[in-house]
Image (cartoon, helix red, strand yellow):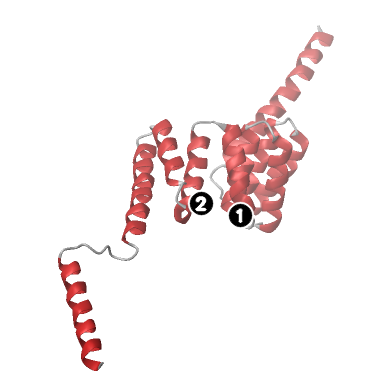
Amino acid sequence: MKSKKLFLANAILILFISCSSNKALPIPGQSDIAITNIYAEYLNIADIYFDLEKYDKATTYYKAAMSNQDIYWTAYYKLAKCYAVQSKWEEAEKSYEDILKRDPENNTIKSSIAYIYAMNGNTDKALSVYEELIQENPDEVSYLENYISILITTEKTDEAKNYYNQLIEKFPENKNNENFTKYFDSIKTEETEPEEKSDSVEEA
C-alpha cells in the first residue's frame, strides 16, 4: 500500500516538474496581472495625450482605463480634468460631482467644482461652495480671491468690496491684491465722472 502511494506521489511530482519545465501550467493570477497591465497602459497613454493637449484621444484612453475597477477612480478623475480643460462644463460638472460624493471632504475637489459651477453659469452654487471653503479654511487666500471674483462677475459689487476689504486686512502681502484694488478704483472713477460732468453743465 505504501509502495503504491509512494509511486503515485513520485509520478505526480514527475508530471508536475515536466509540465512546469514545458510551461504548460499557467502561473496563478498571471492573466489577471496581464489584464491589469493593459489598463494601466491605457492610463499611461491617456496621460501622454493629455500632456500633448490631444484631449480627445486622452478622453478615449481614460474611458478605456476606467473598465478596470482598480484604477477606475484615478482614470475618472483625470477624465474630469480633461473635460474641464476643454471647457466641456456639463461633463466636467457631472464628473466632479460624482468624485465629490466619493470624497466629500476633499477641498481640492470642492474648489475645482466651484470653479466649474461658475464657468457653467451656476454662480449661486459656486458662491455657496466657496462660502463653505472660506469658513472651513480661513487662512486659504485663494478661496477668498475666487469668491470675490465671482461676486464681481455677478455684479454683487458691495458684497465683493466687503470681502475685498477683508482680503486687504488679512492678507496685505497677497500679490493679487493690486488687481482687485485697480478694479475697485476704476469703479470709483466711473461713479464720480458723471457727477463732475453734471456740475460742469450746471456751471455753464
Residue type beneath disc 1: Arg
Asked whether, in this view, residue 42 is left or right of residue 125, the answer is left
Per the image, the residue denoted by label 1 is: 102
Q: Residues within 10 Å of mark 2 (few under 14, many from 20)?
A: some
Q: Check the image and report above or below for 33 versus 97.
A: below
Say which residue label 2 marks. Answer: 73
Residue 172 visible, this orientation = no
Looking at the image, the residue that sits furthest to the bottom is 2
Looking at this rendering, what residue extends furthest in the right direction? 202
- The numbered dot on residue 58 is none
Image-quadrant location for residue 161: top right
Check the image and report above or below for 190 versus 132: above
Tell me which residue sits at (76%, 39%) in the image: 159
First along the sequence among labels 2 and 1: 2
Q: Name the residue: 70% across, 28% down.
A: 187
Q: Position of residue 80 (x, y in %)?
A: 52, 41
Residue under the point 62% across and 50% down: 100
| Number of numbered tags placed on the structure image | 2
Identify which residue, 204 or 149, lies in the foreground: 149
Mark 1 burial class by Cα count in 10 Å: few <14, some 14-19, many 20+ = few
Q: Residue 168 at x, y = what percent?
A: 65, 47
**Above or below 119: residue 76:** below
Work out whether 72 lies above or below 183. below
Secondary structure at numbered mark 2? helix
At horizontal 53% and vertical 45% (from top left) the residue drawn is 175
